[in-house]
Amino acid sequence: MALDTNAVLELLPKGEGLLPKWQLLVAAMAVFNTLQNFATLKLTRRVYTRVPPNQVTALQARTFAVWTLTAAIVRGYAAYYIHDKRIYDMALFTYLIAFGHFSSEILIFRTARLNSAALSPVIVSTLSLIWMLRDYNFYVTP
């Protein structure tokens, strides 16, 4: 069975620019992270390396999975409804919350180190925040 490229392209967001596609990519990555948090503690423990492994619990991972899935849904909606101010704003806040969480775990609570597992969500949230704030008036219709 051959993959129909046109059918796949039809599923992509139709909004102008790359931001809608970025939102979809980040939402898809968040779904992967959600599944990973439900399935195993392995990757979650790579984020919170400054605490004993037994303190990174299955309950914490499942709670984090539910939050991540919620953020994925909001960002997925933003990919397809990028001009809706309410959805755009909610997506923007998901990145602000993610930035606040991971930054505070690294800088304040000191439960995470500056490794790739903890740094990548900080980078994604920071870039997304800057991008969304910079292009706010382009995407959001008054």
Image (tube, rainbow, N blue to C red):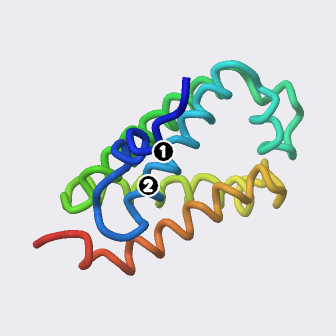
Q: Secondary structure at mark 2?
A: helix
What mark, if any, has residue 23 been given in the picture?
A: 2
Above or below, 2 against 50 in this view is above
Give the left or right position of residue 117, taking residue 79 as reference: right
Give above or below for 139 relative to 12: below
> Position of 88 compared to 59: left or right?
left
SS at badge 1: helix
* Camera-side residue of 20 and 114: 20
Q: Which residue is painted at 64% across and 55% down in the image?
A: 121
Other-residue count near label 1 (Cα within 10 Å), few / some / many at <14 / 14–19 / ≥20: many
The three-letter code of the residue at mark 2 reads Gln
Do residues under tags 2 and 1 come within 8 Å of each other at their CB atoms? yes
Residue 61 percent location from the top left of the image: 66, 27
x and y percentages locating residue 107 in the rendered image:
73, 63
Judge by depth and name the residue closer to the eye, 37 or 100: 37
Q: Amino acid at mark 1?
A: Ala
Q: Position of residue 23 (x, y in %)?
A: 43, 54
Where is mark 1, residue-wise?
Answer: 27
The residue shown at (79%, 43%) is 48
